[in-house]
Amino acid sequence: MTSRRAVVTGGAGFLGSHLCEALLDRGTAVVCLDNLLTGSTANIAHLRDRPGFEFAHMDVTEQVGVRGPVTQVFHFASAASPADYLRYPIQTLDVGSLGTRHALELAVRKGARFVLASTSEVYGDPLEHPQTESYWGNVNPVGPRSVYDEAKRFGEALTSAFRHALGLDAAIVRIFNTYGPRMRPDDGRAIPTFLQQALTGEALTVTGDGAQTRSICYVDDTVRGVLELAESRHPGPMNIGSPFETSMLELARYIIELTGSSSPIRFIERPVDDPAVRRPDTALAREVLGWRPKVSVEEGLRATIEWFTRELGAPV
């Protein structure tokens, strides 16, 4: 290993575990912190014996204590799916506020580059489309989704304050809908829900009329964008996501096609404050990082289907 050593909060989660793996592949030692509220040690089991990997069961809302040198801090700890943050609303607000502060303070003590995992949800139900980093968003501060949206917005404000007041080398990445292996089948987000239903022969539950859109980005592309931002000196905010925009109904039909499922589609009530559209303007990432998604939607979905098939024990 090199002298580079990164701390990843939420490192046993879906996205965090892929980030830990990518850092190790680049020769960076990794300290993975997670309280396992929504993460799982199964996500990092294949990393346990790799040189330079450490795991600590730690709640970052209480402390972030890491011995030794640290060159990068990635704050990825948070419930990320509506099902999870609606189940754990207080914990979600705590990790976005207290957890972010503790992670920032660690970066200050260690003189490390800090990267905050923010989200496209800071744009709320956007009135600008596609969404640029300069857009301030349209968020309901007291709606059911606000526990996640406002936690991330506060995390961005706190990160900016540490950068301006204390000179911390910090960056904000706004991550758009990411998918791939290691998502929980009961995650609650569209792709794992549709895949579980298609592979087990259940009806795919599309909310509303299915016209609402999302832009889906394969996890390898998202992680590559995060790491390239971390290696730059840019403070962000920076959108990382795919320009491929699809309606939920189109996505459900495509997953049925790719899985060869005979599942029907069933329409259910649309959640409160569910955004009507979502697509990032990624001009900044292209200009500053030279970043753009490389994995096609079909390639990414097929890799995810293979993983879900093994997890669920479903026929291919």
Image (cartoon, grey):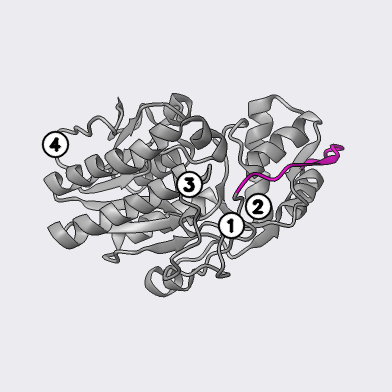
Q: Report if the CB atoms under discs 1 and 2 are less than 8 Å apart.
A: yes
Q: Which residues are magenta?
A: 259-272
Residue appearing at x 80%, y 31% in the figure: 202
Name the image quarter holding residue 30.
Answer: top left
Q: Residues within 10 Å of mark 4 (few under 14, many from 20)?
A: few
Q: Which element is circle 2 on?
A: helix
Determine which residue is flagged by label 2. 299
Compare marks 2 and 4 and give the one earlier in the sequence: 4
In which quadrant will I find the N terminus?
top left
| Picture disc at residue 5 | none
Residue carrying label 3: 142
Q: Amino acid at mark 1?
A: Val
- Residue hosting label 4: 68
Query: Is residue 53 left or right of 278 when viewed as pictured?
Result: left
Q: Residues within 10 Å of mark 2 (few under 14, many from 20)?
A: few
In space, the residues marked 1 and 2 are separated at their CA atoms by 6 Å
Question: How far apart are the alpha carbons under marks 4 and 3?
Answer: 41 Å
Depth check, mark 2 against mark 4: the one in front is: 4
Q: Is residue 266 magenta?
A: yes
Q: Is residue 188 magenta?
A: no
69 left or right of 184 in image: left
Task: Work out whether mark 1 precedes mark 4 in sequence or the reverse, and give the earlier one.
Answer: 4
Q: Position of residue 49 (x, y in %)?
A: 36, 27
| Vertical side of 292 occupied by 275: above or below | above
Q: Secondary structure at mark 3?
A: loop
Q: Of the residues shown, which amino acid type is indicated by label 4?
A: Gly
Query: Could you tell me what secondary structure mostly forms the magenta stretch?
Result: loop
Type of amino acid at the residue the image marks with label 3: Val
* Disc 1 from disc 3: Cα separation: 37 Å
Contact between labelled residues 3 and 1, with CB atoms less than 8 Å apart: no
